[in-house]
Image (tube, rainbow, N blue to C red):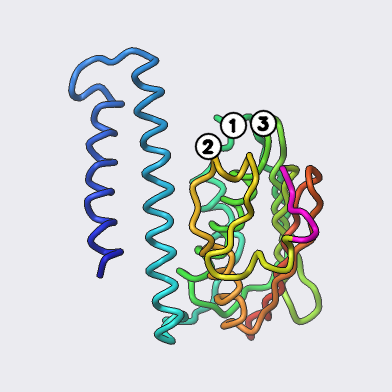
Amino acid sequence: MVSHELRSPLSSIRQKLSLIVDGFTGDINDEQKQIVNRVQHRIDGLIGMISNLLDLSRIEAGRLVQQKERIELPEIIDGVVELMTQEVEEKGLKFEVTIDAQLFPIHADRQSMETVVTNLVSNAVKYNREGGKVSIGAQNRGEFIELIVADSGVGIAKENLPRIFDKFYRIRSDYTRKVVGSGIGLPLVKAIIEAHFGTITVESKSEKGTTFTVLLPRGVG
């Protein structure tokens, strides 16, 4: 209930800020526009955090996967890439997307899969450095579909890797303190994937980037 009460006014605030940026309330200079854009970015982070909290409540209530259907994973990947293109360009990053032309469909809950891809790609962007690369790949692996999301960013120290899927756990460093987060995104991703009888693994080194590998059963028919 608290999450719902928070998300609605934040969305309203963001909408009104958009009116300012678009000039509906009068002209603003570039410096003012940059400040408002930064505020919008922080609000987007808070709205995302609240959405994850709501999803977490669904996990704990046993209502994570609502409706499974035949899904073409490239459609979801393309949607997330399109959504995040502006942020990627503003940060000086590049997307590299490689998808098997004959990729099998999966049988999954669409909203949940969108949450998985969005969270993994968003992390790859947030924890990357200017001029870096975000790689997204999807290919057939026997009876599974393999989804890989990799970045060339700050990476994760070896001692932190065992805990990154723990609820509310956040790595503390000079860089991560600048990033809005709740420690819910990756636990949520793991729960969704396991609810679809899949697996997720991670490989990373400090300052060398991070790679997440997801295996999901291919759809039947």
Residue located farthest toward the left when viewing the structure as drawn: 25
Which mark is drawn over residue 138? none
Residue sitting at x 41%, y 66%: 53
- Residue 143: percent from left, percent from top: 76, 82
Pointers 1 and 2 in contact (C-beta within 8 Å): yes
SS at badge 1: loop
Residue type, mark 2 in image: Glu
Residue 134 is at least partly visible in this image? yes
Q: Quadrant of residue 42?
A: top left
Mark 1 and mark 2: Cα distance apart in space: 6 Å
Residue type, mark 3 in image: Glu
- Relative vertical location of residue 106 with respect to residue 6 in this rendering, above or below: below
Q: Does the magenta stretch include residue 156?
A: yes
Instruction: Specify which label sits upstream in the sequence, 3 or 2.
Output: 2
Mark 1 and mark 3: Cα distance apart in space: 6 Å
- Residue 6: percent from left, percent from top: 27, 57
Residue on which the image places disc 3: 130
Mark 3 and mark 2: Cα distance apart in space: 11 Å
Residue sitting at x 41%, y 23%: 34
Provide the residue span drawn in magenta: 154-159
Mark 1 nearby-residue class (10 Å; few <14, some 14–19, many ≥20):
some
Q: In this view, does 7 lie to the left or right of 151?
A: left
Residue on which the image places disc 1: 91
Q: Is residue 214 left or right of residue 116?
A: right
Residue on which the image places disc 2: 87
Mark 2 nearby-residue class (10 Å; few <14, some 14–19, many ≥20):
some
Residue sitting at x 61%, y 57%: 120
Residue 101 is at least partly visible in this image? no
